[in-house]
Image (cartoon, rainbow, N blue to C red):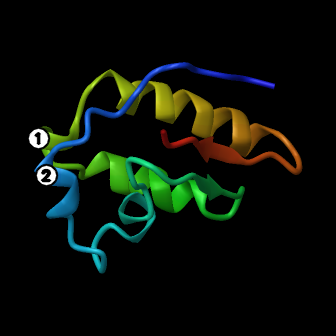
Amino acid sequence: MARVEGGVEWTAAFADLDPAAFPMLWALTPYGDAVFNQRQVPLLLAELDRLPAACGGDWVGQARELCQVVERGTHLYLWFIGD
């Protein structure tokens, strides 16, 4: 099991993401949980590649690393835990 304790700095830029262009990231909310399975992780990675700078931060690199763990494993999930 891999784990990172960090956070996404929640700004208005996240609320402005187009759900059609960023359906995986649009699932993130500051207070709810989001879970991505092995088939969704490549979609999430593609969205991270084109994420606007206003939404970036250290969390992006951490998310990429955890995505790689999920891709290499079996029956693994990537969880974002809200407040």
Q: Quadrant of the N terminus?
A: top right
Viewer-proximal residue among 70 and 26: 26
Residue 18 falls in image quadrant = bottom left
Viewer-proximal residue among 1 and 32: 32
Q: Position of residue 49 (x, y in %)?
A: 31, 47
Q: Position of residue 71 (x, y in %)?
A: 70, 44
Q: Amino acid at mark 2?
A: Ala
Label ID, residue 7: none
Q: Residues within 10 Å of mark 1 (few under 14, many from 20)?
A: few
Q: Position of residue 31 (x, y in %)?
A: 44, 49
Q: Is residue 33 left or right of residue 47?
A: right
Viewer-proximal residue among 71 and 29: 29
The residue located at (54%, 19%) in the rendering is 5
The residue located at (72%, 23%) in the rendering is 2
Q: Is residue 54 left or right of residue 28?
A: left
* Farthest right residue in view: 74
* Farthest bottom residue in view: 20
- Tag 1 or tag 2, which sits nearer the N-term? 2
Residue placed under numbered mark 2 in the picture:
13
Q: Amino acid at mark 1?
A: Ala
Q: Is residue 57 left or right of residue 31?
A: left
The residue located at (34%, 34%) in the rendering is 8
- Dots 2, 1 in contact, CB < 8 A: yes
Secondary-structure class at tag 2: helix
Label ID, residue 54: 1
Label 2 and label 1: CA atoms lie apart by: 6 Å
Secondary-structure class at tag 1: helix
The residue located at (88%, 47%) in the rendering is 74
Residue 27 falls in image quadrant = bottom left
